[in-house]
Image (cartoon, helix red, strand yellow):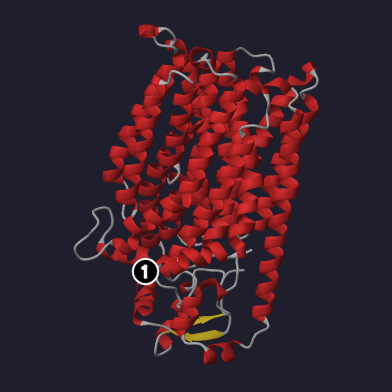
């Protein structure tokens, strides 16, 4: 699939551009006039053929992926360490009931979700080098202050502020990656980035295991040390963003240069993403009209359903409940922390593998459905086996499957959205909006369906996860796939020469993915 071509547009053009004057794009039999900037792109694409292009992508990987992944690791740790703190006596020390604790976890997602689209719009306007240090240092301070919580009210305030400050990291990172990587590269990079979230489950268990030994040091409980240590590290990471995180590629100019990319690498890095889907491109200027277009687009809400019911609900519920769930299998609190690590390591490996395969075959729907199916099988096995104390090994194995399946779908949804929304401002808003509902709905529900009073069988939690995956995610994904496939077939049947005679190149570019020449990636 793709749009007019499933490959990098220049893979066809580079062989023909030299014999066609003026410069034209030739893809799937369609000939369109292009602008001088596109001609420059073709020239650079030929110059960067082979090793130079690989070198550029490696530079991008080495700068963007470690920085964003570490930030997301800290974000996931700071947001999810509540489950670990609970095992260290947090509820007893601050006088909270389990119900109050679950409600406090839920409140985070109201500010978290509501601020996601706002943050992505701010990111689109200010750029990552300004906006990201601001929000990272902010949530680091909030995490650090959590060690001073005295009661339920103060913890609710902390969770609300944590949601407000952390909201921009996840959707913002997806948007940053979409501005630097082509459709053939994006899912792998989003999977590596998202792997930091699954790795957080592994590191969180290890860190909590180590911090557990600090219980009583200087008169502080282990949960206080947990919040203090993770908060200080996050603040340091926020300060480091000023030095390691780049601007958007289109923000560089003669006055604002880069030390980690040469002038030609920077120019090609900008143009190769801009023209990856052909010569007719939308504007890169920020317009509120494009934000509103994202809010009116059917694709935004179908992807939101998938992210909400098939991603956020089961993922957040597992994140907050897994330490307790493993403890219910017969392990001590400290041992349970360590036992949560292997499932998350396995999930990280599967997440990256699925992202790579999705890029390799340029297919999104089939791999997303595979992830849902894997997570569904894990939940079903776990639901059946937790009733039997002699099947703890099988239950533990099912946790591996559930963690891997539900974690791996998230970067694919981000990639599927990114490659099918061409306008950068609309894309930023679409990612933020789909995560708004996913975070508010998924997080608030996911943190309240595995009730402590129903442990260890959790009938509500398991049943809700199964129903949400099938009805709320797999069915909308299939509808989304079928509608885009139907639209692609309709456009294939159109007279392309008639389309080119009816619209100018700028008009086709303004249409974005609604252009008759565009083909949705399935």
Front residue of 243 and 218: 218
Residue identified by numbered label 1: 285
Q: Tell me the quarter of the image containing the N terminus.
A: bottom right
Q: Where residue 440 sits in the image (x, y, percent)? A: 56, 43
- Tell me the residue at 40%/50% (across/down): 61
Left or right: 101 in relation to 378: left
| Residue farthest front in this picture | 153
Residue 364 seen in the current view: no
**Residue 242 location, quadrant:** top left
Q: Where residue 374 sits in the image (x, y, percent)? A: 71, 42
**Residue 221 location, quadrant:** top left
Residue 337 seen in the current view: yes
Left or right: 56 in relation to 207: left
Compared with 71, 1 (above or below) is below
Compared with 82, 113 (above or below) is below
Total numbered labels: 1
Q: Tell me the quarter of the image containing the C terminus.
A: bottom right
Left or right: 420 in relation to 15: right
Front residue of 16 and 396: 396
- Tell me the residue at 59%/72% (across/down): 519
Q: Where residue 319 sits in the image (x, y, percent)? A: 58, 31
Q: Residues within 10 Å of mark 1 (few under 14, many from 20)?
A: few
**SS category of the residue bearing label 1:** loop
| Residue farthest left in this picture | 255
- Tell me the residue at 41%/56% (across/down): 121
């Amino acid at each position: 699939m793709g749009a007019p071509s499933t490959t990098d547009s220049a893979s066809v053009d580079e062989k023909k551009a030299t014999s066609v004057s003026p410069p034209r794009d030739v893809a799937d039999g369609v000939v369109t006039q292009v602008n001088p900037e596109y001609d420059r792109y073709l020239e650079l694409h030929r110059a960067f053929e082979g090793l130079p292009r690989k070198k550029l992508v490696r530079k991008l990987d080495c700068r963007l992926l470690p920085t964003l992944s570490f930030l997301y690791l800290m974000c996931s740790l700071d947001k999810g360490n509540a489950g670990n703190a609970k095992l260290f006596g947090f509820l007893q020390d601050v006088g909270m009931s389990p119900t109050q604790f679950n409600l406090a976890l839920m409140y985070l997602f109201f500010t978290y979700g509501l601020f996601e689209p706002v943050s992505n719009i701010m990111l689109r306007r200010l750029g990552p080098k300004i906006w990201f240090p601001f929000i990272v240092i902010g949530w680091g301070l909030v995490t650090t202050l959590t060690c001073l919580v005295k009661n339920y009210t103060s913890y609710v305030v902390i969770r609300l502020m944590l949601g407000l400050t952390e909201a921009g990291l996840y959707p913002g990172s997806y948007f940053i990656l979409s501005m630097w990587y082509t459709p053939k590269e994006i899912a792998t990079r989003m999977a590596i980035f998202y792997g930091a979230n699954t790795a957080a489950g592994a590191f969180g268990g290890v860190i909590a295991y180590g911090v557990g030994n600090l219980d009583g040091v200087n008169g502080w409980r282990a949960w206080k040390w947990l919040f203090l240590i993770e908060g200080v590290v996050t603040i340091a990471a926020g300060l480091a963003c000023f030095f390691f995180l780049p601007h958007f590629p289109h923000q560089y100019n003669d006055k604002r240069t880069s030390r980690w990319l040469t002038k030609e690498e920077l120019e090609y890095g900008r143009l190769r993403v801009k023209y990856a889907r052909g010569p007719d491109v939308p504007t890169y200027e920020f317009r509120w009209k494009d934000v509103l277009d994202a809010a009116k687009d059917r694709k935004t809400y179908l992807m939101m359903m998938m992210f909400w019911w098939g991603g956020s609900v089961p993922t957040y519920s597992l994140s907050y409940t897994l330490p307790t769930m493993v403890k219910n299998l017969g392990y001590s609190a400290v041992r349970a922390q360590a036992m949560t690590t292997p499932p998350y390591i396995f999930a990280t490996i599967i997440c990256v593998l699925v992202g790579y395969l999705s890029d390799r075959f340029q297919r999104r729907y089939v791999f997303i459905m595979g992830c849902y199916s894997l997570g569904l099988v894990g939940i079903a096995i776990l639901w059946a086996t937790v009733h039997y104390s002699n099947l703890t090994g099988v239950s533990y194995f099912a946790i591996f499957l559930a963690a891997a399946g539900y974690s791996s779908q998230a970067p694919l949804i981000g990639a599927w959205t990114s490659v099918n929304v061409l306008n950068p401002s609309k894309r930023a808003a679409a990612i933020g909006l789909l995560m708004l509902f996913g975070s508010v709905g998924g997080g608030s529900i996911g943190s309240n369906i595995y009730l402590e009073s129903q442990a260890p069988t959790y009938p509500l939690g398991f049943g809700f996860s199964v129903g949400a995956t099938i009805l709320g995610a797999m069915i909308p994904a299939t509808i989304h796939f079928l509608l885009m496939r139907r639209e692609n077939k309709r456009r294939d049947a159109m007279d392309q020469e008639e389309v080119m005679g009816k619209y100018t190149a700028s008009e086709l570019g303004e249409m974005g993915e609604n252009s008759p020449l565009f083909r949705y990636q399935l």
